[in-house]
Amino acid sequence: KAGVTQTPRYLIKTRGQQVTLSCSPISGHRSVSWYQQTPGQGLQFLFEYFSETQRNKGNFPGRFSGRQFSNSRSEMNVSTLELGDSALYLCASRVSANEKLFFGSGTQLSVL
Amino acid sequence: AQKITQTQPGMFVQEKEAVTLDCTYDTSDQSYGLFWYKQPSSGEMIFLIYQGSYDEQNATEGRYSLNFQKARKSANLVISASQLGDSAMYFCAMRELTQGGSEKLVFGKGTKLTVNP
């Protein structure tokens, strides 16, 4: 069974641009969550999607958005990039509530 | 809000020895779950072990065991017979329930473990 797949693995953007990250969950998993990891703030929850609906969002500005498709694949978008958005973005999926999260290898975003 | 504290930024252990990574938590919930994840340099977060607040036995998964002391609000990870491949960041996390039935993980800052040959 394939794990959580995130693409691309690395991204370099400049300030003001926008970026879209992709995540394919494990087959059969309907919940997809996104986390941001930085050296200063550590791991922070961005949002969770379940059956194409955003169920919860962390304390991030509106420039961070996402969506989930009918096949459970998810995308995350960041508009008007800032230097502070440089981070490892991790996607995770789970079958249902109270089940453990399986993470992907992340997308390393660098904003110059 | 829930909080996870990992007080050891870095730990060193000799190959084949055991090591304990500390984790304390703060929550007002009666029902909660605690996780440990390993993050090698590749970036992927690898699930290691889970402990539910009502579990009577300490969780074990192969060389990993969780020393769960509920009254002290601690959930330390014990790795037995350390291997070179255990060198990585280790994160303790707690499940936090949110509105609408969603849940998220609250992570500690992590401990960098280095296994020396």
Image (tube, coloured by chain):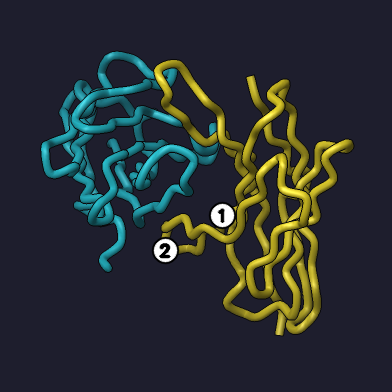
Chain colours: A cyan, B yellow
Q: Residue at x 35, y 37 (%)?
A: A33
Estimate the x, y position of residue A51 in percent, counting from the top left. 22, 32
Q: Residue at x 62, y 80 (%)?
A: B84
In this rendering, would B23 be left or right of B38?
right
Chain of the residue displaying label 2: B
Estimate the x, y position of residue A61 in percent, counting from the top left. 34, 15
Mark 1 residue element = strand
In this rendering, would B67 be left or right of A106?
right
**Residue B37 numbered tag:** 1
Q: Amino acid at mark 1?
A: Tyr
**Residue B42 numbered tag:** 2
Residue lying furthest left in this view? A70
* Structural crowding at the residue carrying mark 1, measured as other residues with C-alpha within 10 Å and reported as few (<14), some (14–19) or many (≥20): many
Chain of the residue displaying label 1: B
Image: A68 above or below B13: above
Residue lying furthest right in this view? B71
